[in-house]
């Protein structure tokens, strides 16, 4: 990489006389030494300049000055007296360096340097109707579009199924037993493949107690894969004084795996 030496056509002045350094010289060295180092008149660094580079009567260099790396530059008058010495460089220090170009690739980086990476292009879709883009682990490919499986989710009155599981529900009654407890069984319309989870609840308990208000306990269990057993009894003691005097309406629900 090269960089141009400042203004391509400056006038150099003598610091003491403040006059152009007519017939002076610019001499270039390895930075910090007196070892001569060349410059060039083109950016490709193929046409070397003389070293030192002479200045004309107006104090100008009549050639372009391109640098490569770091230099110490000395300005002298026509008799060789030193006017100043400065350290300069081509401006590339600390700058990112682009690698040589490569056809069909794009510029990227690995976090520290620039490099050329392969362009990953989508393969030609011709003849790939109804296919989707996928990969075999190294390249992009078109594959047959997979059919979406039909959903077996269904619902209806008292029934809802999602996948292999279903919720069923309904209403039933426990009879008026005339005693402290009553019970009944409920058939589940769709048989489960394993014992389901069941619940039952009632809003009102029509039983009679001579001394206390009504309160009751409800127990529900699945006695089989398609049968619920519901029992209700008073939690008032002595239980012999409590009587279920009317049918008890309740709701039930079951959840479990179905075929």
Image (tube, rainbow, N blue to C red):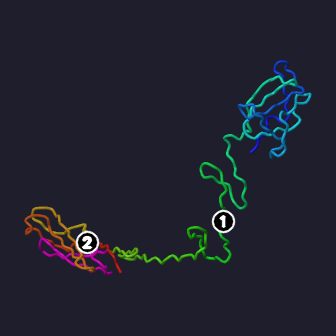
Whether the magenta-drawn stretch holds residue 196 is answered as yes
Q: Nearer the viewer, residue 1 or 32?
A: 32
Q: In this view, does 132 lie to the left or right of 198?
A: right
Q: Which quadrant is home to the N terminus?
A: top right
Front-most of residues 34 and 203: 34
In the image, residue 41 sits, relative to residue 172, either above or below, namely: above
x and y percentages locating residue 259 in the rendered image: 35, 81
Furthest residue in direction right, as rendered: 57
The quarter holding residue 237 reads bottom left
Q: Is mark 2 on a helix, strand or loop?
A: strand
Q: Mark 2 points at which residue?
A: 250
Image location (x, y in percent) of residue 102? 72, 58
Residue 224's quadrant in the figure?
A: bottom left
Q: Separation of disc 2 and disc 1 at Cα?
A: 66 Å
Residue bearing the label numbered 1: 121
Q: Position of residue 28 (x, y in %)?
A: 78, 33
The segment highlighted magenta reads 169-198
Mark 1, secondary structure of its residue: loop
């Amino acid at each position: 990489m090269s960089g141009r030496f400042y203004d391509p056509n400056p006038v150099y002045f003598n610091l003491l006389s403040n006059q152009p350094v007519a017939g002076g010289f610019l001499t270039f060295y390895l930075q910090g030494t007196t070892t001569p180092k060349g410059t060039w008149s083109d950016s490709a660094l193929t046409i070397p300049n003389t070293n030192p580079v002479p200045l004309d009567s107006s104090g100008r260099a009549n050639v372009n000055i391109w640098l490569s790396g770091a230099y110490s530059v000395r300005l002298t008058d026509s008799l060789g007296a030193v006017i100043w010495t400065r350290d300069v460089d081509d401006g590339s220090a600390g700058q990112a360096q682009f690698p040589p170009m490569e056809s069909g690739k794009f510029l990227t980086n690995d976090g520290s340097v620039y490099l050329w990476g392969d362009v990953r292009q989508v393969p030609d879709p011709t003849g790939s109707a109804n296919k989707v883009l996928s990969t075999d682990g190294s390249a992009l490919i078109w594959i047959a579009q997979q059919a979406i499986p039909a959903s077996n989710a269904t619902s209806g009155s008292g029934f809802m199924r999602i996948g292999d599981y279903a919720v069923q529900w309904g209403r039933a009654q426990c009879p008026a037993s005339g005693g402290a407890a009553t019970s009944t069984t409920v058939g589940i319309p769709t048989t489960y493949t394993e014992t389901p989870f069941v619940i039952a609840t009632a809003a009102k308990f029509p039983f009679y107690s001579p001394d206390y208000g009504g309160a009751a306990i409800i127990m529900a269990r699945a006695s089989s894969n398609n049968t619920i057993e519901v029992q209700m009894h008073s939690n008032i003691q002595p239980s012999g004084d409590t009587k279920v005097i009317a049918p008890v309406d309740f709701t039930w629900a079951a959840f479990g795996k179905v075929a």
